[in-house]
């Protein structure tokens, strides 16, 4: 025993090295697999405050673009409003129950305080958290498209798993032909994502719009993701290799909208019942 | 605490804040990252004990991780190069050896020696960091390209910093 202790003491540098590296490796695994260790990330108060400061300086340089984006969004919303006004609604004859009119989605706007696009697993930090009613699992969109999913929240800050994260998959649909597939990033170019599982018989063309399907109860239906940028089909493949150009430029993300789906729990629990029955 | 110790602590925070406030936003061509904070670890005095080196490396890496949302990644790479650092320094001992308070910087032995000292350590740091981040060798060539460009970028910025703020021989 004594000799063992002496041995450990003599090689203390190596054993400290081993212990620290094992601890780090454990942190990495924990952070990837789980919801992340609760406090040691950019939603931590002090860290977020510093990021916030850094962001507030950078904000001045982006004012022009943000302004233009907001003006464009205003225009498109106004057009939609005009369109709605002209529409003739059919008179509803069968009475609907009250719960059918209860709103399904609630939107909260948040400011981006920290954002990465160049890693393989990218995260975005926003300045709204638990106090604003935000919870892990909610969808995040922007005026120009899908952004990601809330990973975890602290009191005043939240961390989003961006679409630019190799493990994130989003159910999507090709708007023109209504075929379903999955959007996933390949980890290289932050403006392109892959659109998988579109079968051979469909013929997607460059320029087709890809939108969310609303199948997974996280993202609302019909949120734009991007347009097809490249179509490839090798001879023996079952599915197309499609590249989609994201409509949201993630490098210029400044404001996002968090979507709370009031019926997500209902839809999920209903689907769970079916899954159990089938098994 | 000695005057040197206080200076070390201040420069720790300067390097850390400079990394997370400014260099975090600078990524050239989506591939070349600059991790200048490694320079702080490289120029710690020669006589720092291995335990202290790894401790400081861990704290520095961990702090950077909190800002990059990559818990453990930077800490892992930093502890790794801190473990290797003293072996590497012993291999590169100049004629006459080191003084105990020397810091292995550009001013100590000139450009060529410093590049030989810092180059491989930065390369190892970046290799560990990027391959750990991907979690394997899935995007081997892309990751390798990232490592090489980032190593050059980081080394360049370290050199510029060394010329701008030369650490005087004490």
Image (cartoon, coloured by chain):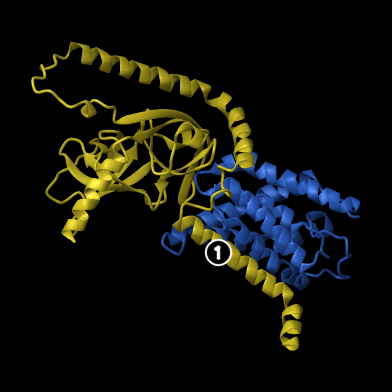
Chain colours: A yellow, B blue
Identify the residue at horizontal 59%, vertical 43% (top origin).
Answer: A44
Relative depth, front residue between A269 and A215:
A269
B97 vs A264: above or below: below
Q: Residue A259 versus residue A50: which sits nearer the camera?
A: A259
The answer to whether one can see residue A234 in this image is: no
Q: Secondary structure at mark 1?
A: helix
Q: Are there few (<14), some (14-19), or many (20+) residues within 10 Å of tag 1?
A: some
Q: Tell which of A106 and B156 is nearer to you.
A: A106
Q: Numbered disc 1: what chain?
A: A
Q: Is residue B70 visible?
A: yes
Vertical placement of A80 versus A131: above or below?
Answer: above
User: Residue A268, percent across and down?
Assistant: 27, 46
Give percent across and percent down for residue A131. 50, 33
Residue extending furthest left? A93
Image location of residue B142, percent across then percent down: 45, 56
Tell me the residue that label 1 is attached to: A25
Q: Quadrant of the C terminus of chain B?
A: bottom right
Write the residue at 75% across / 69% down.
Answer: B86
């Amino acid at each position: 025993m004594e000799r063992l202790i002496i041995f450990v003491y003599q090689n203390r540098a190596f054993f400290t090295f081993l212990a620290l590296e094992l601890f780090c490796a454990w942190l990495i695994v924990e952070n990837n697999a789980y919801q992340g260790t609760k406090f040691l990330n950019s939603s931590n108060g002090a860290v977020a405050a510093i990021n916030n400061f850094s962001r507030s300086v950078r904000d001045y340089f982006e004012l022009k673009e943000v302004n233009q984006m907001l003006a464009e969004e205003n225009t498109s919303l106004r057009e939609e409003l005009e369109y709605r006004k002209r529409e003739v609604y059919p008179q509803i004859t069968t009475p609907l129950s009250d719960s059918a009119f209860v709103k399904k989605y609630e939107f909260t706007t948040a400011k981006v305080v920290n954002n990465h696009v160049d890693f393989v697993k990218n995260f975005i930090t926003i300045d709204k958290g638990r106090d604003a009613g935000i919870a892990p699992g909610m969808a995040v969109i922007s005026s120009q498209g899908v952004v990601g999913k809330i990973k975890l929240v602290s009191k005043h800050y939240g961390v989003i798993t961006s679409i630019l994260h190799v493990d994130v998959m989003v159910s999507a649909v090709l708007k023109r032909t209504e075929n379903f597939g999955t959007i996933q990033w390949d980890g290289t170019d932050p403006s392109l994502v892959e659109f998988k599982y579109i079968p051979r018989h469909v013929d997607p063309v460059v320029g087709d719009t890809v939108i969310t399907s609303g199948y997974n109860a996280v993202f609302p239906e019909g949120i734009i993701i991007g347009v097809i940028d490249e179509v490839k089909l090798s001879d023996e493949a079952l599915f197309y290799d499609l590249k989609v150009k994201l409509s949201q430029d993630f490098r210029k993300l400044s404001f996002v909208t968090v979507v709370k789906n009031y019926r997500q729990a209902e839809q999920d629990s209903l689907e769970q019942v079916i899954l159990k029955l089938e098994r | 605490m000695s005057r040197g110790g206080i200076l070390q602590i201040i420069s720790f925070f300067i390097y850390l804040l400079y990394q997370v406030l400014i260099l975090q936003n600078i990524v050239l061509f989506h591939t070349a990252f600059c991790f200048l904070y490694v320079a702080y670890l490289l120029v710690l005095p020669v006589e720092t004990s291995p335990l202290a080196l790894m401790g400081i490396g861990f704290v520095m890496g961990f702090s950077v991780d909190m800002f990059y949302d990559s818990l453990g990644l930077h800490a892992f790479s930093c502890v790794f190069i801190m473990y290797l650092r003293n072996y590497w320094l012993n291999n590169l001992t100049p004629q006459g050896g080191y003084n105990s308070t020397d810091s292995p910087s550009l001013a100590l032995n000139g450009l060529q020696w410093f590049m030989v000292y810092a180059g491989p350590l930065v390369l190892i740091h970046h290799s560990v960091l990027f391959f750990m981040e991907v979690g394997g060798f899935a995007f081997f060539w892309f990751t390798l390209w990232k490592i090489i460009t980032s190593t050059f970028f980081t080394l360049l910025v370290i050199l510029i910093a060394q010329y701008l703020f030369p650490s005087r021989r004490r």
